[in-house]
Image (spheres, helix red, strand yellow):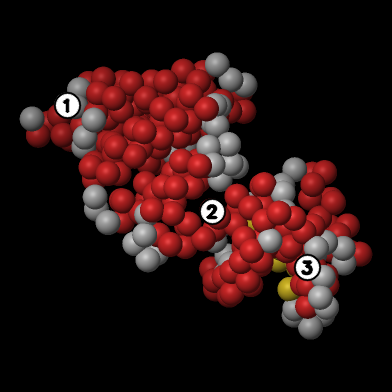
Amino acid sequence: MGQKLFEQFNGYAIPLLVFLNGKGEELDRVVGYRDSDEFLSILNNVLYNQDTFMSLYKQYQEGDSSPDLIDKLSIKSQERQDDTLSIELYNFVINNELIFDINVIERAKYFFAKKELKNDNTKDIMNFISNYKTSNNYTAAYMDLIRYYATKKDTLLEVNTFKEMIIEVIESKHLTGSSLASFLNSYAWRMSELNTNLEDALKKSNESINIIDSMNIEIKERKPMLLDTKAEILWKMNSIEEAITIINIAIELDLENQYYKDQKTKFQNSKKGN
């Protein structure tokens, strides 16, 4: 039932909270985690029908095309995955750039560049990456390109783009702290999946673990996942004993996780096979 509702409302991320009126019409939605203050503000907006999707869309239909309204409504149309409305709004932004904030313009250009990937056009997303290095969507655009190459099974371009992105995001400090650790871990895991660049993958895996070790206790709860990546790489490098040692640490940190135990069994069985 939950999955059916998720699909019915074009869900693409969780948590997803949709507010409906008595007629079953969508008033607004919340995609992803929000802290308590922001969530309370959203609830108040829904209660008084201010800055909700429904209220903004009604104003738009009545002829309001002010930059502030277009900005807010375009974000909500993307959250709803309403491509028709998003294209209309972002075309308006592109055609009237002089009246919009640079962040709105960048979001519009990113939206169209990402859509062009579906047409096998990588030029626009590459131009976005080159021209908007300070954009909030900079790292997302890089990852879109990497995923595109992955779906096309172009391993060389996928790997090279991933490595290029690592250099760029570290130099630009687009990612820091736990976000950087997660990104480095994603790279390391993907290299293990592709069974390539394993020495570099191990180096990046260690860097991600070191970052987490330097952070607060809550962040350190992610450490078992990072250790699993390191263990997988070591296993692929045929360092089986070391892989078992590392996965044992992950198991000790998360005793209820069956996956890590299965990983250990996989490592041990491969050792017997040798």
**Helix, strand or loop under label 3:** loop
Horizontally, is 124 left or right of 272 in the view?
A: right
Could you say where residue 137 lies in the image, as x and y percent from the top left?
Answer: 56, 45
Q: Is residue 46 left or right of residue 136?
A: right
Q: Tell me residue 242's x, y (percent).
A: 26, 20
The quadrant holding residue 11 is bottom right
Res 199 → quadrant: top left
Pointer 2 local density, CA inside 10 Å: few below 14, some 14–19, many at least 20:
many
Q: Earlier in the sequence, mark 3 or mark 1?
A: 3
Query: Is residue 190 left or right of 105 when viewed as pictured?
Result: left
Label 1, on which residue? Answer: 238
Q: Quickly name the residue at label 2.
A: 110
Mark 2 vs 3, N-terminal side: 3
Which one is closest to the eye, mark 2 or mark 3?
3
Q: Which residue is mark 3?
A: 65
* Residue lying furthest bottom: 23
Q: Is residue 144 above or below residue 179?
A: below
Q: Residue at x 85, y 51 (%)?
A: 41
Q: Position of residue 71 (x, y in %)?
A: 73, 58
**Circle 1 crowding by C-alpha within 10 Å: few under 14, some 14–19, many from 20:** some
Disc 2 or 1, which lies upstream in sequence? Answer: 2
Of all residues, the one furthest to the right in this rendering is: 48
Crowding around mark 3 (Cα neighbors within 10 Å: few <14, some 14 to 19, many 20+) is: some
CA gap, disc 3 and disc 1: 61 Å
Q: Quadrant of the C terminus?
A: top left
Q: Amino acid at mark 1?
A: Asn
Q: Position of residue 118 (x, y in %)?
A: 39, 64
Residue 40 horizontal side relative to residue 163, left or right:
right
Residue at 86% from the left image edge and 59% from the top image edge: 45
Q: CA distance from mark 2 to mark 1?
A: 42 Å
What's under tag 3, amino acid-wise? Answer: Ser
